Image: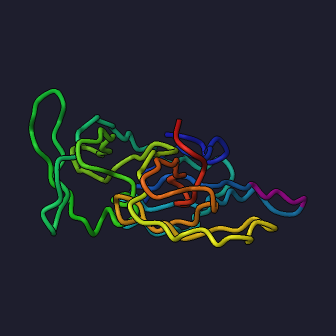
């Protein structure tokens, strides 16, 4: 058990049958009342964000999340199929649980699959991924006085805004936390 005072962003906890990852933590102590620890957390099963609170020093149960590297094989419409690189066993995850993550995964990519006590929770993405531009608007000549951006479609179907100098066919780096352009791939 962990003391609520010791919670940190990134930790996973088990509360009332659900698994959460801590996003942000705040402690409030006034002279008249006891400490209150508030945590903004994301439910790993549903993806929803909620706020939980405890009294200072209350015990919270940690959740041991396992990560296994697997290769993404294909999508069959209802689920995404991954293969364990060591045992070659295949795992299917419903696409409805991976709406955000599927925008950053290409076939044959290696990703970390997260699980809790044998139950597959989802996919752990790297901070940044490199993807190729398949469609890109032409740059408008003379529109360079400001930080002008144009629309681009990536190989996974993700739509992003890119600077005018980026062309179709180029590889770019995308930040997976917000889905925004981060730079050219080297």
Asked where in the image residue 26 lies, by quadrant, the reply is bottom right
**Figure disc tally:** 0
Can you give x and y, in whole percent of width and height, for residue 159 in the image?
A: 46, 68
Along the horizontal axis of the image, is 149 left or right of 16? right
State whether residue 64 is above or below residue 182.
Answer: above
Q: Nearer the viewer, residue 120 or 12?
A: 120
Residue 138 visible? The answer is yes
Along the horizontal axis of the image, is 178 left or right of 134? right
**Residue at the image position 52 percent from the left and 47 percent from the top:** 173
Which residue range is magenta in the image?
Answer: 27-31
State whether residue 99 is above or below residue 14.
Answer: below
**Residue at the image position 29 percent from the left and 45 percent from the top:** 115
State whether residue 23 is above or below residue 78.
Answer: above
Q: Is residue 174 magenta?
A: no
Asked where in the image residue 71 lies, by quadrant, the reply is top left
Q: Nearer the viewer, residue 100 or 107?
A: 107
Q: Nearer the viewer, residue 68 or 175?
A: 175
Can you give x and y, in whole percent of width and height, for residue 182 in the image?
A: 60, 50
Can you give x and y, in whole percent of width and height, for residue 165 in the image?
A: 62, 56
State whether residue 145 is above or below residue 174.
Answer: below
**Residue at the image position 60 percent from the left and 47 percent from the top:** 183
């Amino acid at each position: 058990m962990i003391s609520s005072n010791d919670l940190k962003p990134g930790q996973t906890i088990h509360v009332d049958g659900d698994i959460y990852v801590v996003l942000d933590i705040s402690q409030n102590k006034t002279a008249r009342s006891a400490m209150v620890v508030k945590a903004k957390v994301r439910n790993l099963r549903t993806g929803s964000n909620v706020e939980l609170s405890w009294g200072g020093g209350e015990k919270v149960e940690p959740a041991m999340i396992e990560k296994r590297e697997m290769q993404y094989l294909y999508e069959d419409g209802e689920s995404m199929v991954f293969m364990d690189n060591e045992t070659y066993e295949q795992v299917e995850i419903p696409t409805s649980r991976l709406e955000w993550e599927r925008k950053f995964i290409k076939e044959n990519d290696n990703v970390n699959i997260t699980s809790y006590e044998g139950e597959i929770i989802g996919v752990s993405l790297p901070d940044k991924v490199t993807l190729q531009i398949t469609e890109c608007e032409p740059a408008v000549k003379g529109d360079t006085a400001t930080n002008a951006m144009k629309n681009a479609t990536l190989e996974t179907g993700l739509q992003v805004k890119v600077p005018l100098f980026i062309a179709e066919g180029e590889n770019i780096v995308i930040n997976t936390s917000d889905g925004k352009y981060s730079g050219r791939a080297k």
